[in-house]
Image (cartoon, rainbow, N blue to C red):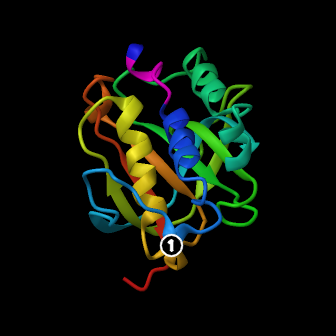
């Protein structure tokens, strides 16, 4: 499954490394990417249950090169418990300790039904119903577009709208070809939309 071997969150980390003030001074982050640092839409979604592999990390650890996110993607795709290759995949960020400056849980996985039994070795998280600001990347190589989209999130002037109840990258049929990927990043926000 070549499309998933290109690491999306290494690009997320590279974007942080290129913008070292991102976690400390979000309002001052700049980006030279060709798309807007504004969400393309707001949506309200019901809660969902995601299952996959997870770990606790921080952006500082990921930037240092000692991060775990690439390993999670590799472990997930080497699992015997995967849905169909064309199924939607998620990179979900939740259980934030203190926004983006401290620990959070990253889960790489797919959606499962609320009552589904999980095989040993898979973790799950429950995302509450939420309103999301949705950032959509341009089409291009996965190695570029995911980091650019996260750069737009960090450059967004409405960081105070974030709830940190659970954010996620959504990889659907638009990400089947790793050289021409389009990904959505859903950022949980207060419901005053």
Q: Does the stretch in magenta take in 163?
A: no
Q: Estimate the x, y position of residue 71 in percent, counting from the top left.
A: 65, 24
Quarter of the image with the C terminus in it: bottom left
Left or right: 85 in relation to 47: left
In the displayed structure, 70 sits above or below 54; it is above
In the displayed structure, 193 sits above or below 102; it is below
Secondary structure at numbered mark 1: helix
Q: Residues within 10 Å of mark 1 (few under 14, many from 20)?
A: some
Residue at the bottom extreme of this rendering = 192
Which of these two is toward me, 51 or 21? 21
Q: Which residue is mark 1?
A: 27
Q: Residue at image x 50%, y 72%?
A: 27
Left or right: 137 in relation to 117: left
Which of these two is toward me, 181 or 109? 181
Q: Estimate the x, y position of residue 107 in percent, counting from the top left.
A: 62, 41
Range covered by the magenta-colored residues: 3-7
Q: Residue at image x 53%, y 56%?
A: 167
- Magenta stretch secondary structure, dominant: loop
């Amino acid at each position: 499954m070549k499309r998933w071997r290109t690491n999306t969150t290494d690009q997320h980390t590279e974007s942080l490394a290129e913008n070292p003030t991102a976690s400390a001074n979000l309002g001052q982050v700049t980006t030279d990417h060709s798309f807007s640092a504004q969400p393309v839409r707001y949506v309200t979604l019901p809660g969902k249950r995601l299952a996959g592999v997870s770990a606790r990390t921080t952006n500082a650890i990921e930037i240092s090169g000692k991060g775990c996110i690439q390993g999670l993607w590799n472990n997930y795709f080497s699992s015997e418990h995967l849905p169909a290759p064309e199924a939607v995949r998620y990179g979900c960020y939740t259980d934030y300790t203190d926004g983006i400056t401290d620990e959070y849980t990253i889960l790489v996985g797919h959606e499962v039904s609320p009552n589904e039994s999980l095989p040993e070795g898979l973790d799950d998280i429950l995302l509450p119903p939420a309103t999301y600001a949705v950032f959509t990347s341009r089409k291009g190589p996965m190695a570029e577009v995911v980091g650019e989209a996260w750069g737009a999130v960090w450059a967004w002037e409405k960081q105070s709208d974030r709830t940190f109840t659970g954010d996620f990258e959504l990889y659907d049929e638009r990400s089947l070809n790793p050289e021409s990927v389009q990904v959505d990043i859903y950022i949980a926000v207060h419901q005053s939309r």
